[in-house]
Amino acid sequence: MALIPSPLLREIVAADYELLDFLLRCQARARGRFVRLGTEIPIIRAWQAIPGVGPVVAARFCAYVKCPHRFAKKGKLSRYSRLGVTQSETGGKAIRRQHLDPSGCGALKDISNKAFRAALNCRGDNLIKRSYLPARWRARARRNTPASPPRERYWPSCGPCGGKARPTTITMM
């Protein structure tokens, strides 16, 4: 502030900094309320037990999916999350390589990716590290190329009327 020569400009910049400080305090209070609210909802608490999933990721998942039981099969939830593998065929012959299905909700794919990356980066041992890292090293040894992440994601399951929630594993094809 001392480097600003004009007192009027210093006053304007100081007012902007005061406003920024106020907004940061408001944001911190809102986040605290959001986290406290998440602790009251059983499915969000269950989601947070999964490595790499915090209150924001858990709440985003619950907001998009509501209840995973509305999907008849696990593969339908995977496809809705843009994590289902599809292959184009004509006459029983593949015309393209397998790829992730682009239809569905991209935000759920983002949530899954963030949870996966956070679980890999968190301290200590967890199920995602134990399954992904050995697969990655096996693939490198086999092909000398990096492995793609395992097609296994962790979703909570909930009862139709807010029953007890427990994390479950969905293995995709």
Image (cartoon, rainbow, N blue to C red):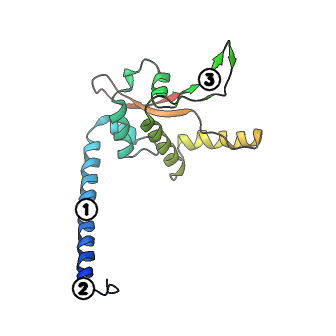
The secondary element bearing badge 2 is classed as helix
Residue at the image point whose x is 50% and y is 34% from the top: 153
Task: Decide: is 99 above or below 35.
Answer: above
Front residue of 129 and 23:
23
Q: Quadrant of the N terminus?
A: bottom left
Q: Alpha carbon of mark 2 to alpha carbon of mark 1: how far?
A: 24 Å
Number of other residues with Cα within 10 Å of mark 1, as a class: few under 14, some 14 to 19, many 20 or more: few
The answer to which of 142 and 159 lies nearer the viewer is 142
Residue sticking out furthest to the top:
91
Q: Position of residue 38 (x, y in %)?
A: 29, 43
Label drawn at residue 7: 2
Mark in the foreground, 2 or 3: 2
- Badges 2 and 1: C-beta atoms under 8 Å apart? no
The residues bearing labels 3 and 1 have C-alpha atoms spaced at a distance of: 49 Å
Report the mark closest to the observer, 2 or 1: 2
Q: Place residue 20 in its image quadrant.
A: bottom left
- As measured in the structure, the alpha-carbon distance from the residue carrying label 2 to the one carrying label 3 is 67 Å
Residue at (33% x, 38% y) in the render: 44
The residue labelled by disc 3 is 87
Q: Tell me the amino acid under the disc marked 3.
A: Gln
The C terminus is located in which quarter?
top right
Please provide percent x and percent y for residue 21.
26, 68
Amino acid at dot 2: Pro
- Residue behind mark 1: 23
In this rendering, the answer to whether 51 lies above or below 8 is above
Local crowd size for mark 2, using a 10 Å CA cut-off: few (<14), some (14–19), many (≥20): few
x, y percent for residue 85: 57, 27
